[in-house]
Amino acid sequence: MDSTLQHMATDTQPPSRASPGRRQVWVGQARAFAERYARELFRNKVVLFWSVAFPVAFYLLTITVFIDTSTVPDTVVPYQKAGVAVSYGMFGAIVASLNSFGQQLAADFEADRYMQYRSLPLAPSADLAGRALAGLALSVVAFVAVLAVAVPTGAAFSLRSAATVPVVVLAVVTFAVVWMMLAVVVATLVRDARYASVVTISIALGAYFLTGYNGTDPGAFAGPDWLLNWLPFTLATRLVSQNIVVFPDTGVLGSGSLLSVPSLSFGVGLLVATTVAAVAVGLLVMRHAVYAEVRP
Amino acid sequence: MTAIESRGVTKEFGADDVVRGADLAVEEGEALLLMGPNGVGKTVLLSCLAGSREPTEGAVEVFGRPVGEDGGDSLTFLLQDSMAVETLTGRENVDFYSRLHHRFTDRWREYVDRLGLAEDLDKRVGNYSEGMKRKLELALTMSVDVPVYLLDEPTAGVDLTNIQRFHDIILEARDAGKTVLVSSHRPIDANIADRVAFMPDGTVSTVSEPDGLMEQVPPVVRVTGSEAMRTAEEYVDGQLFPVGGEARGFLAEDVAFEELAGAVEGESLERIDPTYTDLFNYYVHVQS
């Protein structure tokens, strides 16, 4: 008998349900998926261009070409730039979480990778969690990249209160997760990377422009202002903007923020609730459409 | 005991049925080779056996339990071209798969060494040749310590020297009591088979030991020269199978070799012992 087979000590007992071993296996699988997808996303130059470089470039183009800052008082310009940066940063996060994430899942369908995964004792939730962690990392990088570029261009960011950091983190995380769960649905329906890319980029652009740059410019939104506080992605963007674009009273605009957002508890509650619902949908799709063929 | 079994498995894709009522039982501890030409549904049948696809009709059981209930604990599946992730290095693939299956072992180290892949582990799989991908896939699959291995065309694109190494690894698993089901259209893979099953057209037509199958093959003739080939075609069962500048065929039941020899001039005809290639041609193209 082969020495390899004879001497390799292995755990040949499947971990029982709810045992620490089973939890360990789940964590290991989620980590495996997170590392794999993060490697793939961050190595893909096309993904990095559209998720990170494109929003940064569009921010720079906007503040230098599209917006005539000479008509705005000097004291207001830094906050105007900060508001634009938040808007484009969140747009980068949409592209990362919807387009790049969705394309990656669709590519796995195209490569018949789920045929392989379905034969393994995998937890669909571990796959989804790992994917989402990698997509979230890219979304955060896309968002932070625009803000980091905006600072040297004169954008002024500050913290509204002690709750600002957790609120902004929560808003960005829930924003990205909701888009990623939508990407799971789209990619599962189309199962073709190029088609998924066209659909998701169309959704991203449509959602961004039709809602007045994710709700940061209510004047460009055709619907009622209150609706921007109910759509999870516009609410998240407005909460971020309200919390880090805080201007002092310059005698021109008043002080604080031009955006009327709901109370913190309501806003946070709504974001958490929509994210939980979105994750539930994502899990259902993973279990019953992606991993569904024979699993009981 | 039967390790894995399909009973009346049919798999349809829209109006097309790729697998039609396939019955196949693989006994515990045997290496069974599933042979058939391209496109007859070998991969689809294997994916049904692995639990990757749900049969449209029929049932699949692993050690007497429905494959869905087993949930991948008892088997591992090498799905050609879908396993190794091309954007990762070989080592990153090992890292990835090692965490996906709780029965993954360190055996991969010895396998990549034996297959001559150790020095290429830090290269992206997208830059691998087909043969290198097969080596990585085999190492990843055989490193999982399960009772049943399902290997979908593991030797496709592998050179003859390395095929022997692949066979050694598969036979070692068999000798250790594992059950191995290998699909292939390469006759050389019959070397590892305890039994061979033929799948000529979406169904499993014949299952038996290679020696028994070989005995059932009619006399094989080798013909050279275009004139002799034209003449011989009237005396063989089915068709002649060209191989380079010659052709091989099976004497029809009511034809004696001497009769054909009388019809073909000169030394352009020879009676030969059947090879695994003849076995494949007979059971896949003639008998079916």
Image (cartoon, rainbow, N blue to C red):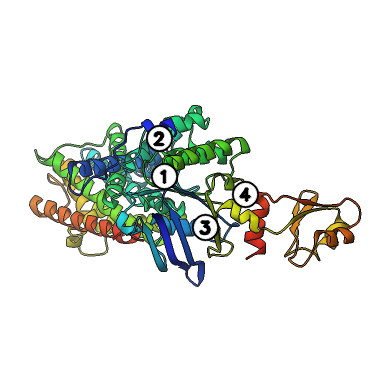
Query: What residue would you read off at disc 1?
Result: B178
- Residue A197, quarter of the rendered image: bottom left
Q: Which residue is mark 3?
A: B42
Instruction: Please indicate, yes or no, whether residue B204 appears anywhere in the rendered image.
Output: yes
Residue A207 visible in rendering = no
Q: CA distance from mark 2 to mark 3?
A: 28 Å
The answer for how far apart the CA atoms under marks 2 and 1 are is 10 Å
**How many other residues sit within 10 Å of disc 2, few (<14), some (14-19) or many (≥20)?**
some
Residue shown at the point (22%, 44%) measured from the top left: A22
- Tag 3, which chain? B
* Badges 2 and 3, same chain: no
The image shows residue B107, relative to residue B55, as above or below, that is above
Nearest to N terminus: mark 3 or mark 1: 3
Q: Residues within 10 Å of mark 1 (few under 14, many from 20)?
A: many
For the residue marked with disc 4, what is the amino acid? Pro
Q: Amino acid at mark 3?
A: Lys
Residue at label 4? B187
Circle nearer the viewer, 2 or 3: 2
Residue A16 locus on image (x, y percent): 21, 47
Which label sits in the foreground, 4 or 1? 1
- For badge 2, the amino acid type reads Leu
Q: Is residue A173 above or below residue B66?
A: above
Q: CA distance from mark 4 to mark 3?
A: 15 Å
4 or 3: tag closer to the N-terminus: 3
Farthest residue toward the top? Answer: B119
Query: Of the numbered discs in the image, which one, if any, rests on residue A5?
Result: 2
Residue drawn at x 41%, y 68% is B58
Tell me which residue sits at (80%, 51%) in the image: B246
- Find out whether the residues at labels 2 and 1 contact each other: C-beta distance under 8 Å: yes
**Discs 2, 1: same chain:** no
Looking at the rendered image, the quarter that the C terminus of chain A falls into is bottom left
